[in-house]
Image (cartoon, rainbow, N blue to C red):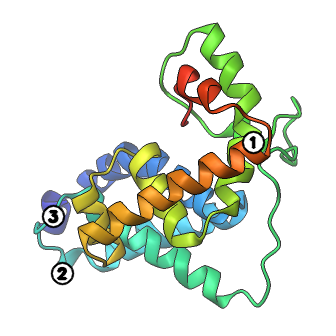
Amino acid sequence: MLAFKSGDARAFRVLVQRHRGPVFNFILRFTGHAARAEDLLQETWLKVVRSSAEYEPKAKFTTWVYTIARNLCVDSARKETYRQTDSLDAPVRGDEEGRSMGESVSDDSAQGPERAAHNTRLRPMLGKALASLPEEQREVFLLREYHGISFKEIAEVTGVNENTVKSRMRYALEGLRKRLTELGVDAELVTDGRTVA
């Protein structure tokens, strides 16, 4: 980012290549709409370009870019007069294979076939459980579990103190456990499969 700030246009390409996928996945999971996520991703990168002169390396670049993305997601949600969301297990329009949105989100980690099958069964239920969480709990869970951001950095991204972030995470986990149990998922099944993504 410092190279881009000083005028190296190629550095911006490196930033986008390095962070586009994770930031898009965060926005997609936050909004639940692929088209809106693409729009917000573009707005995020535009804001990075426009704010590059003011960028100061007080925190990691990822903290800064996730803060921008999160704020745009919150603003977008506030602008909506009503919220109409597609289920994560609804088929994605234009996907010839008939995959759901939850299945189409890329997962770069290598998995064995047993874990992949386990995750395929649980992913739609996890999507429903995540959607049932309050927004502030869901965003902390997504930033921590899907993107591996520390509690301290999440506090910077969300603008609340670290203890509040940890409390939101605890409530998110309790809420997910309760909702998954209501959906018929045994707690041991979730822990044995190590399912998060």
Point out the image quarter for the C terminus: top right
Q: Is residue 79 above or below residue 186?
A: below
Per the image, label 1 sits on a secondary structure element best described as helix
Viewer-proximal residue among 193 and 179: 179
Q: Amino acid at mark 2?
A: Glu
Tell me if label 1 and label 3 are in contact, CB under 8 Å.
Answer: no
| Residue occupied by mark 1 | 125
Are there few (<14), some (14-19), or many (20+) residues within 10 Å of tag 3?
few
Viewer can see residue 3: yes
**Alpha carbons under labels 2 and 3: distance apart:** 13 Å
Viewer-proximal residue among 8 and 90: 90
**Alpha carbons under labels 1 and 2: distance apart:** 42 Å
Decide which of tag 1 and tag 3 comes sooner along the chain.
3
Q: Is residue 69 above or below residue 10?
A: below
Are there few (<14), some (14-19), or many (20+) residues within 10 Å of tag 2?
few
Point out the image quarter for the N terminus: bottom left
Q: Is residue 119 above or below residue 68?
A: above
| Residue occupied by mark 2 | 54
Q: Amino acid at mark 1?
A: Met
**Alpha carbons under labels 1 and 3: distance apart:** 35 Å
| Residue occupied by mark 3 | 59
Per the image, label 3 sits on a secondary structure element best described as loop
